[in-house]
Amino acid sequence: MDPRDRDNQFMDAAIEQAQKAEACGEVPVGVVVVANNGGILASAFNQSITMADPTAHAEILAIRSAARRTGNYRLLNTCLYVTVEPCPMCMGAAIHARIGRVVFGAFDPKWGAAGSLYDFAGDRRLNHHPEIVAGVRKQACRRLLIDFFAARRGKNSL
């Protein structure tokens, strides 16, 4: 399978997770962690509000689940697909887990740590440098966020 087709396929799975977050009133961010053989190890969506936990970002939940499933805190040769550029906490977790590749859809100029605001993967002071692929299904991922926040602003203006 062409790598772009694979990236689109797994980003679609992450988008499905983001839609679950939105249905729960959470910021629509979704993630899948994919093994080297193409199997999905874990999937998750934002649950910070539901769990009353500021660390319950989709990436953190998926990384924890994938580590439990593999029985290893190192997720070597895996790929993290996320609808929005990871924040510093999530990018730090991906680096600690030794995730090999991070693929994201929408850029996050306010919190992004994979090239927008910070570039953790490019920081040679760190001991692991995942490959970063940005902008996969960018418009669909951006649209989720734009629509979500527009709806929230609309409710607040009533």
Image (cartoon, rainbow, N blue to C red):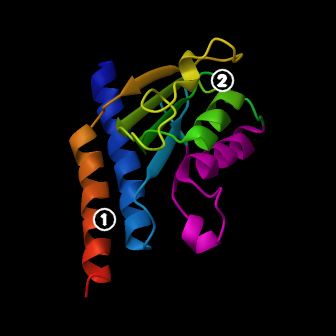
Residue 132 x, y percent position in the rendering: 46, 22
Name the amino acid type tagged 1.
Answer: Phe
- Which residue is the site of mark 1? 148
Q: For numbered disc 1, what is the local secondary structure?
A: helix
The image shows a total of numbered marks equal to 2
Query: Which mark sits nearer the N-terminus, 1 or 2?
Result: 2
Residue 123 x, y percent position in the rendering: 60, 17
Residue 14's disc is: none
Residue at 66%, 37% in the rendered image? 93
Residue 42 x, y percent position in the rendering: 57, 46
Span colored in magenta: 42-71
Residue at 71%, 41% in the rendered image? 67
Residue at 44%, 73% in the rendered image? 24
Q: Nearer the viewer, mark 1 or mark 2?
A: 1
- Vertical position of residue 34 compared to residue 120: above or below: below
Image quarter (top left, top right, bottom left or bottom right) of the C terminus: bottom left
Q: Is residue 55 magenta?
A: yes
Q: Is residue 37 visible?
A: no
Q: Is residue 89 magenta?
A: no
Residue 10 x, y percent position in the rendering: 38, 38
- Vertical position of residue 152 compared to residue 112: above or below: below
- Is the residue under label 2 in contact with that under label 1 (CB below 8 Å)? no
Q: For numbered disc 2, what is the local secondary structure?
A: loop
Name the amino acid type tagged 2.
Answer: Leu
Q: Is residue 125 visible?
A: yes
Tell me how far mark 1 sits from mark 2, CA to CA.
34 Å
- Which residue is the site of mark 2? 76
